[in-house]
């Protein structure tokens, strides 16, 4: 009996240690770097709210009728995506970055529903995300048919269970040729899970970490272009999708 009790206590101790280690890992996300923090400041053109969600809104005119909900990458501080959100909002679109429990979108893939309900003036929505965030954005689109009109995948692809190939959904898949964590062939290999008219953008020289502003990421390859250059291509391809779901008379 003593031996059983001792073994049970040992197992519990190991489980608690493992849980403590996981919590410590999840609660120490990557980023943001100074460029990202600077983009959290409101300006004459963009209003930024950091109460709960990170919301980027055009300051001088109402937002267009399309908006973007963005899920961060796994264990990446959501503020790391502020520069891209600023740039997209600068083109007139509402952008909302959803912080995730334990910095992992897998724990709240349905976050977009509450966000979209809070902005009833936005008629069309795209959901997107980076890496794990993109996979969970795809899961949201799969589990909520018709809830969003667009899907933006940044270095991401749907799980095999989330087949969107038959959906009437605008999709943009954006990935880097030098990504060391989500390899280009893995992204392109998911094409059968996406609509046939998916817009594919491979960023020559782009890597995984430069989809945000959080510094180098273990396991990634060095990029051959600057963070600003990669971000410009990401923003451009994302705006192209938002333009496709925006009503012609919304300007």
Image (cartoon, rainbow, N blue to C red):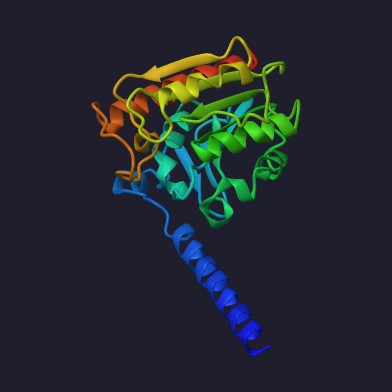
Q: Position of residue 79 (x, y in %)?
A: 44, 48
Quadrant (top left, top right, bottom left, bottom right) of the C terminus: top right
Residue 232: x and y in percent read: 35, 25
Residue occupying image coordinates x 66% and y 40%: 112
Left or right, 137 with respect to 60, comes to right
Q: Is residue 21 above or below residue 152?
A: below
Q: Is residue 250 visible?
A: no
**What residue lies at 65% left-to-right and 82% top-to-bottom?**
4
- In the image, residue 186 above or below residue 15: above
Which of the image's four quarters has the N terminus? bottom right
- At a point 72% along the width and 36% down the height, the residue shown is 120
Nearest the viewer among 145 and 10 is 10
Measured as percent of width and height from the top left, residue 93 is found at: 54, 29
Q: Nearer the viewer, residue 105 or 159?
A: 159
Q: Is residue 58 shown above or below 244?
A: below
Depth check, front residue: 226 or 224: 224
Q: Residue furthest bottom?
A: 2
Residue 193, image x, y percentages: 63, 20
Q: Residue at x 65, y 16 (%)?
A: 247
The answer to whether residue 251 is above or below residue 57 is above
**Could you tell whether 222 is left or right of 187 in the image?**
left
Res. 168 visible in picture: yes
């Amino acid at each position: 009996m003593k031996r059983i009790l001792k073994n049970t206590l040992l197992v519990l101790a190991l489980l608690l240690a493992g849980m403590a280690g996981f919590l410590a890992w999840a609660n120490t996300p990557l980023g943001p770097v100074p460029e990202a923090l600077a983009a959290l400041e409101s300006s004459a053109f963009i209003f930024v709210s950091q109460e709960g969600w990170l919301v980027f809104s055009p300051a001088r005119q109402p937002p267009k009728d399309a908006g973007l909900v963005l899920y961060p990458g796994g264990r990446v501080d959501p503020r790391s995506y502020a520069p891209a959100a600023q740039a997209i909002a600068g083109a007139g679109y509402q952008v909302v970055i959803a912080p995730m429990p334990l910095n992992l979108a897998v724990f709240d893939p349905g976050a977009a529903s509450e966000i979209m309900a809070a902005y009833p003036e936005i008629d069309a929505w795209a959901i997107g995300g980076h890496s794990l965030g993109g996979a969970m954005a795809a899961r949201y689109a799969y589990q909520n048919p018709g809830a969003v009109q667009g899907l933006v995948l940044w270095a991401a692809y749907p799980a095999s269970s989330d087949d969107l190939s038959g959906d009437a959904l605008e999709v943009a898949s954006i990935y880097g040729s030098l990504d060391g964590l989500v390899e280009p062939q893995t992204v392109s290999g998911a094409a059968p899970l996406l609509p046939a008219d998916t817009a594919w953008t491979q960023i020559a020289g782009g890597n995984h970490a430069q989809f945000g502003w959080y510094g180098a990421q273990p396991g990634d390859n060095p990029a051959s272009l600057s963070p600003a250059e990669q971000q410009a291509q990401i923003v451009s391809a994302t705006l192209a999708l938002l333009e496709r779901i925006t009503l012609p008379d919304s300007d």
